[in-house]
Amino acid sequence: MRELSRTVKGRFVDGRDWDPDLDIDTRYKRGRHIMDAGFDGLLYRPPERGAGFCVCVLRGEVLDRAVQGNHFKFVWDGKLISRIYSFGSGKEYVPDDLRGSENVIAA
C-alpha cells in the first residue's frame, strides 16, 4: 500500500469536542449549518480513535495535488493483519500499537 498526502487549505469548523454519539437529526442540522455558512469542511474526532482527528472536506478545491509518500507492507497471518512494515523508515508495527489513546501520526 502506498501513502498519498495532500495539503488542505480552507475554512473548517472545529468539531473535535462534539460527542461522536450525536443523534442523526442533530448531525444533519449541524452538517446543513456548516454547508450553508460556506465552510470548506469539518475537523472532528472519530469514534474509533478518540485521540486522533479527521478532516471532512466538502469542496475539492481546498486540496492541493496529491504527493506520494511512504509504502507499507501488511502481513496477513490467515486471520488478521499481524504486522505492518514501513519501507520508508524500516520500522515494523503491531496494528494494536496504532489504536492507543495517544496521538499517533501513522508510521
Image (cartoon, rainbow, N blue to C red):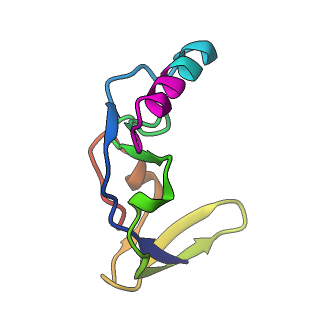
Q: Residue at x 60, y 64 (%)?
A: 81
In this view of the protein, which residue sits in the foreground, 89 or 12? 12
Quadrant in which residue 52 is drawn: top left
Q: Position of residue 68 (x, y in %)?
A: 42, 82
Quadrant in which residue 50 is drawn: top left
Q: Residue at x 39, y 38 (%)?
A: 39
Q: Residue at x 49, y 58 (%)?
A: 60
Q: Is residue 82 magenta?
A: no
Residue farthest along the right direction in this orientation = 78
Indicate the quadrant containing the N terminus: top left, top right, bottom left or bottom right. Answer: bottom right
What segment carries the magenta color? 30-41
Horizontal side of 31 relative to 49 (left or right) equals right
Residue farthest along the left direction in this orientation = 102
In this view of the protein, which residue sits in the foreground, 43 or 75? 43
Q: Position of residue 65 (x, y in %)?
A: 42, 75
Quadrant in which residue 89 is drawn: bottom left
From this view, report whether residue 81 is shown above or below residue 98: below
Q: Position of residue 96 (x, y in %)?
A: 45, 52
From this view, report whether residue 91 is shown above or below residue 15: below
Q: Is residue 37 magenta?
A: yes
Indicate the quadrant containing the C terminus: top left, top right, bottom left or bottom right. Answer: bottom left
Q: Residue at x 34, y 41 (%)?
A: 12
